[in-house]
Amino acid sequence: MRARILVCVCVTVLWVAGATAQSQPDYLGVFSVRVRPEKRNDFDADVKKFADANRNNGGDTWIAMETAYGEGNTVLFVATRQSYAAMEKATESFMGALSKALGKDGAEKLFQDMDTTLLSSRTETRQRRWDLSANVPPDLAALLKMVGQSRYVRTVLVHVRPGQTDNFESLLKDIKAAHEKARSGVTLLVSAATLGRRTHPVLHSAGC
């Protein structure tokens, strides 16, 4: 699980866009897993051990989400990051908290136990696109509060045709302008995958 976790709000759009220029330094670390149905109780118990050890020993910060509509037994862990260096520091904090709570051997065994409950896993790094996002809360604290008070997040993943990224972004800018002009109150968060997926364009959108 090496400390990668999740963040999104009301309507989040994400895609993997080859060489798209991105100016914002904010990132998301996302760790997603597909759990063996017959091992779901064991998985939940293992994750609770990770969370307790992390929480009680000054580890990392993340939000966990489960798919309610779509592929079953899919769980995501998301964390906000300011830079790649911050990702490394967060991983060190997470591993340090586990070692403090469980010891090195105990931490390794917990990773092994959790691995036996999984069908697959994926780690991704996503970069925020604030220029395409709409009705964004004024600061990180407000954003996290909105996420924390939300029970559901709707997410849509879209694969953009090669060579159509600019056209796609233009459409997203129109959507952003419409939301903000109408004062709909709907938050649209856009991020682009930078690591963990193929480099051809992909889109993903979520909302609560």
Image (cartoon, grey):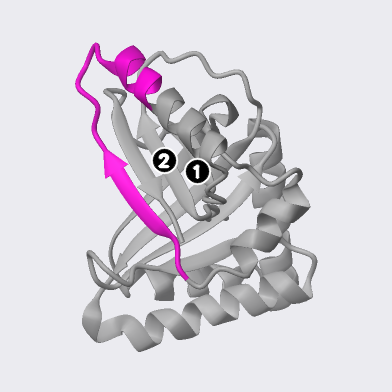
Q: Residue furthest right?
A: 58
Task: Name which residue lies at 45% across and 68% down.
Answer: 152
Residue nearest the observer in this picture, 17 or 194 = 17
Q: Per the image, is 43 magenta?
A: no
Task: Name which residue lies at 52% across and 48% down.
Answer: 184
Give the vertical position of 187 relative to 57 (above or below).
above
Say whether residue 188 is left or right of residue 18.
right
Q: Which amino acid, mark 2? A: Val
* Residues under numbered marks 2 and 1 in contact, where contact means CB atoms less than 8 Å apart: yes
The label shown at residue 13 is 2
Say whether residue 141 is left or right of residue 49.
right
Distance from Cα at disc 2 to Cα at disc 1:
7 Å
| Residue 194 at x, y percent in the picture | 45, 29
Q: Secondary structure at mark 2?
A: strand
Which region shows up in magenta? 152-171
Give the vertical position of 159 relative to 109 (above or below).
above
The label shown at residue 188 is 1
Q: Residues within 10 Å of mark 2 (few under 14, many from 20)?
A: many
| Residue 202 at x, y percent in the picture | 29, 32
Residue nearest the observer in this picture, 119 or 116 = 119
Q: Is residue 146 visible?
A: yes
| Residue 2 at x, y percent in the picture | 53, 55
Q: Secondary structure at mark 1?
A: strand
Place residue 104 in its image quadrant.
Answer: bottom right
